[in-house]
Image (spheres, grey):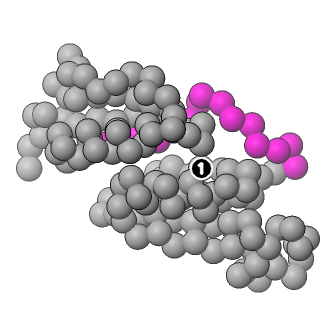
Amino acid sequence: MTIYSYLTFNGNCREAMTFYKECLGGELTIQSVGESPLSEKMPEQMKDCILHATLSKNAMVLMASDMVGEKGLIKGNNISVSLNCKTEEEVKSCYAKLSAGGVANHPLEDSFWGALFGDLTDKFGNHWILNYNKKQTI
């Protein structure tokens, strides 16, 4: 079983996922409503909305959409994206890029469990937890 993070946006999914690709690298695939079989059933103003996007890099998979339910987008603090990095340089680079335009809630610092750890809220309001385990075994 595998669990993936799935983010929901309110019309800016393409912008957010492109930003995440710039920060994290990987391959980004995006399908708009207009490019899907749903196109004929949806209002014209929804054609540019993102039906589904996936950013993949090795074991990292981040999925997203602009498809918001009838109640609208409700943001909370109960979902975070946890990013476990392979090197100290990678965690520092990802933290700097993802926090640009957002809030560095907890800057990277050495933790009691032997990791370089921090968290941030990106410019789209999503919470990220970044971790680099200094005692990794290969």
**What residue is shown at x 51% (from left), y 61% (from top)?**
18
78 in the magenta segment: yes
**What residue is shown at x 28% (from left), y 44% (from top)?**
93
From the viewer's side, name the closer residue of 15 and 87.
15
Q: Which residue is mark 1?
A: 7
Asked if residue 32 is positioned above or below residue 88 in the image, the reply reads below
Residue 47, quarter of the rendered image: bottom right
Is residue 127 in view from this perspective? no
> In the image, residue 100 lies at what x, y percent?
45, 39
Residue 73, quarter of the rendered image: top right
Is residue 103 in view from this perspective? yes
From the viewer's side, name the closer residue of 69 and 87.
87
In the rendered view, does 18 fall on the left or right side of 93?
right
Asked if residue 129 is positioned above or below residue 73 in the image, the reply reads above
> In the image, residue 51 lies at what x, y percent?
69, 67
Instruction: Tell me the magenta residue range.
Output: 70-84
48 in the magenta segment: no
